[in-house]
Image: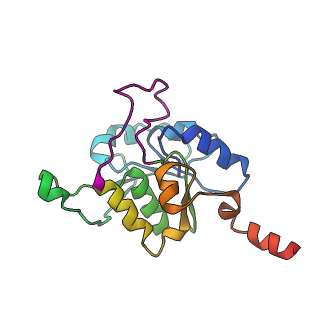
Amino acid sequence: MLGDGHTMPVDRDEFLSWGVPHDVGSLGRSIKEYPGKVHHWFNADGHMAYHWAKNLTNGNGTIKHTLGDYEGFDCDWEIQMPDYHYGDITGETNKMHGSSALFATLAGLELGYSKITLAGCPLDMGGHWYFKEKKQDTLGPIWLGCDFMAWIDFRDSPVAYRVKSMSGFTAKLLGQATRDWADGMLWVQKLLKT
């Protein structure tokens, strides 16, 4: 799962160096930075990204996913999560907590992927990879406690063992992705050699 966090280029390149067969899901602008077919594109903010989704010029049949029914997307998901009293405090309702990466992870697992490696999804405030200069208006996003709570709840779920991350707080929460973990058959090959 290729995110827009500042770690994306390094995470992507390291994962690709492993030579592990994989499908690709992408968030936001990172779809333009993958050197092959992107199978799925995710954006949890369909109400703000419908124009982008309608004009996604990737030409390779990428399936576009969001929360809710919005023009330009192929799949609309209804993922229920705890509100963590966010609605009571802010008055806003039906908000996805965690990040678009958590939405993409939950959808990917529901689609049947046995493992998901997060790349460029550090859940920190280092900004996005496409802003080269790090300054006040390019750093962030500012994650709230409810976002971290959503990831912690996911970490404690029975399917979390199927997800690892290349970097950041998601790696601290879910575990560091490694080539051995990503390549599901590698441990069998090592076992057969011993």
Q: Residue at x 72, y 51 (%)?
A: 18
- State whether residue 68 appears in this view: no
- State whether residue 87 appears in this view: yes
Q: Residue at x 44, y 26 (%)?
A: 134
Main SS, magenta region, reads: loop
Q: Report the coloring of the rendering.
A: rainbow
Please name whichever residue, 37 or 102, is drawn nearer the observer in this view of the structure. 102
As drawn, the residue found furthest toward the front would be 172
Figure check: 184 above or below 11: below
The percent position of residue 55, horizontal first and vertical second, equals 41, 36
Q: Residue at x 54, y 68 (%)?
A: 162
The percent position of residue 94, horizontal first and vertical second, equals 21, 58
Q: Residue at x 58, y 57 (%)?
A: 176
The percent position of residue 180, horizontal first and vertical second, equals 71, 62
The verdict on residue 183 being magenta is no
Please name whichever residue, 34 or 16, is drawn nearer the observer in this view of the structure. 16
As drawn, the residue found furthest toward the right would be 193
Q: How many marks?
A: 0
Please name whichever residue, 77 or 94, is drawn nearer the observer in this view of the structure. 94
Split into 4 quadrants, where in the image is the C terminus? Answer: bottom right
Q: Is residue 53 left or right of residue 119?
A: left
Residue 191: which quarter of the image?
Answer: bottom right
Residue 113: which quarter of the image?
Answer: bottom right
- Tell me where the magenta segment starts and ends, as one range: 123-145
Figure check: 139 above or below 156: above
The percent position of residue 119, horizontal first and vertical second, equals 55, 48
